Amino acid sequence: MSYPPNLAPVPPMAATVSGGARAAGLTVGASTTLMGLMAGLFWGFDISVMPGLADSDDLTFVTAMQNINAAIENVLFGAVFVGAFVLPAIATVLLFSTARRAAAAWTLVAVACYLVTLALTMGVEVPLNDRLAAAGDPSRITDLAAVRADFEGLWVGVNVARTLTCTAAVVCLSRALVLYGRKNPLARG
């Protein structure tokens, strides 16, 4: 049957989505997941780990934080930590290249939020963790209270900031995902 051009049936959405657009959607979804994992990790420290350790003695606090800082340096954490930056950056490029500019703008803001998280992590948290590790065996530290005081307050405050920046990135990526799902892949915008 022949239709006039303005009345021709519209193909189903799945049939009109290009490989690049499909990859963009999958990348935004994976980005949202990884960023959620990072925000959740920081949130867990804010609401349970650090308040729980706040009530402990200095030896327990320093020992626990040294152990936590050593344990977190693993392949799974590294993949999520790096992936939460790399995938949203890739998603931004893919969304721009498939003319999904509104969604791309949200992923770009998420990348900026996570860059702040990375700056806080590398500029403040990692040096604090390294200094705590360099203090040595907690059973041999002569002034545990001073070592703890030099670490705890700043570390906790900066971790709250990381939670906020990661959560903002999750919100941005979620918005990008919604826009990706709503956007007509053949339209510009």
Image (cartoon, rainbow, N blue to C red):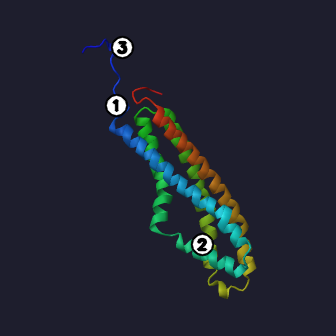
Residue that mark 2 sits on: 130
Closer to the camera, 122 or 18?
A: 18
The residue located at (53%, 47%) in the rendering is: 111
Circle 2 Cα neighbour tier, 10 Å, few/some/many (<14 / 14–19 / ≥20): few
* Residue at the extreme front: 1
The residue located at (58%, 73%) in the rendering is: 68
The residue located at (48%, 32%) in the rendering is: 182
Label 1 to label 2, Cα distance in Å?
52 Å
Residue that mark 3 sits on: 6
Rendered image quadrant of residue 55: bottom right
Closer to the camera, 123 or 60?
A: 60
User: In this orientation, does residue 118 appear?
Assistant: no
Of the two numbered discs 1 and 2 in the rendering, the one whose residue sits closer to the viewer:
1
Residue 86 x/y as whole percent = 46, 52
User: In this orientation, does residue 95 appear?
Assistant: yes
Residue 156 x/y as whole percent = 69, 64
Residue that mark 1 sits on: 16
Q: Are marks 1 and 3 in contact (CB under 8 Å)?
A: no
Rendered image quadrant of residue 142: bottom right
**Which secondary structure lies at badge 3?**
helix
Amino acid at the residue labelled 3: Asn
Rendered image quadrant of residue 172: top right
Q: Are marks 1 and 2 in contact (CB under 8 Å)?
A: no
Is residue 20 rendered to the left or right of residue 154? left
* Residue at the extreme left: 1
Relative to 109, residue 156 above or below? below
Amino acid at the residue labelled 2: Asp
